[in-house]
Image (tube, rainbow, N blue to C red):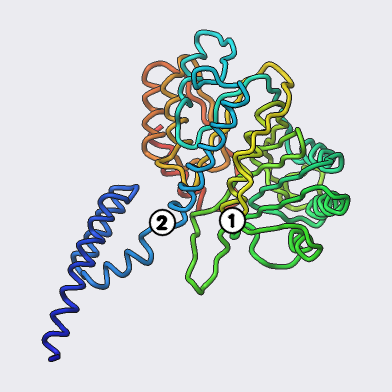
Amino acid sequence: MSWQWILSLVLAAGYALAFIAVLHALLRARQPQSALGWVAAILTLPLLGSMAYFIFGINRVDSRAAKLMSDTAERRMKALKASGLLSGGRVPPTLFAPDTCEIMRVGEGKPGSFRRLGCNHFTPLFNGDEAYPRMLEAIASARHEVFLCTYIFQGRVYGKAFADALLAAHRRGVDVRVLVDGMGTLPGFHKPWKRLQREGVPVHRFIPPHLLPPQMSVNLRNHRKVLVCDGEGFTGGMNIDDVHVMASRTREHVQDVHFLCEGPIVGELREAFLMDWAFVTGQDDTGRLYLPCGAGAMDGRVVMDGPGTPNDPVQDLLCGVISCARRRITVMTPYFLPPRELTSALVSAAARGVEVRVILPAVLDHAYVEWASDHTIPPL
């Protein structure tokens, strides 16, 4: 076979691959800008562009997580129907004031959104001074299971305290599982989770970076902070780190809020953890109904965002809630880098007479984030 034939076959294969890559990018890319960028690269360099797209452009993590979420949701719905908690496909609603009913309907049917459940109680816990002692107490009193998911797990004082409590629970026969983020807990000195690994506690990292095969998903992180101890759950904005304790002697302090969750909502937090656990380990314990007894008169719903959820469910939820507001909107966040849709929703709310307040830290821990935030404030 002459070299002309070989060249022709290579070109034909390259153009065929380019056609498939362009079609896939147009049909599957979540962002139009991303799709157009890949199409331009493929059309400019058909063979190299196609190979780059199939290696770097396809989010295989998202595809695997989407299948897991779909399978889990189906099993969970069957369990809920069998339990009698669903009537006509809906959880029996709690009575709400008329002006809040519209806001409550925003979350119905959202991807990544669990069913709204009543009979819950939520207690705010400010900073690690209030949250950590209560969390450590829950771990110490657990008799069946302790599931912990956190982005950062460190600290000479409280990192060690949590490691001690988790190890003690593991040794007395409690099902202890720890899930930490692969980037938030990069290997180094004074990592309490590494000690747990050495002692035989099941600890796994969420998409840790490595070179072979190449995996550097910097933005695809797990920022969830969830602790489930039997019938109690904790979630909010705090990692496990000494900086969250105002009474600690660290040079920098980070204020944040956690919530103690009691009631059926704890079962949904547990399910969210198990979905992440199944994604990382392949050990699928999801879909088994577990709803603790009622503990109050509050309604709650778990909304998951991240791998496997189409679009941006939390962003969609926030935009929907903002559009329903009639009197006041208060935003309090450490980092204010809202997408254009969220900025537009806030501007529209202010234009129709809603009082909009945005509360930001006086000093940020990352200068580049502060510089970026400065450019998002003028439109407001």
On-image quarter of the C terminus: top left
Looking at the image, tell me whether mark 2 or mark 1 is earlier in sequence order.
2
Amino acid type at circle 2 is Asn
Q: Is residue 14 above or below residue 100?
A: below
Neighbourhood count class around disc 1 (C-alpha, 10 Å): few under 14, some 14–19, many 20 upward: few
Which residue is at the far bottom? Answer: 2
> Could you say where residue 366 lies in the image, as x and y percent from the top left?
57, 53
> Could you say where residue 371 lies in the image, as x and y percent from the top left?
48, 49
Neighbourhood count class around disc 2 (C-alpha, 10 Å): few under 14, some 14–19, many 20 upward: some
> Could you say where residue 9 lies in the image, as x and y percent from the top left?
16, 79
Q: Nearer the viewer, residue 11 or 261?
A: 11
Horizontal side of 105 relative to 298 (left or right) equals: left
Picture residue at 19% right of the left edge, 78% below the top: 10
Q: Nearer the viewer, residue 143 or 59?
A: 143
Horizontal side of 64 relative to 301 (left or right) equals: left
Residue 47 appears in which quarter of the rendering? bottom left
On-image quarter of the N terminus: bottom left
Picture residue at 12% right of the left edge, 85% below the top: 5
Front of the two marks 2 and 1? 1
Which residue is at the far top? Answer: 98
Q: Which residue is mark 2?
A: 59
Amino acid type at circle 1 is Gly
Horizontal side of 43 relative to 183 (left or right) equals: left
Task: Report the Cα–Cα distance between label 2 and label 1.
Answer: 18 Å
Q: Which residue is mark 1?
A: 282
Q: Nearer the viewer, residue 301 or 278?
A: 278
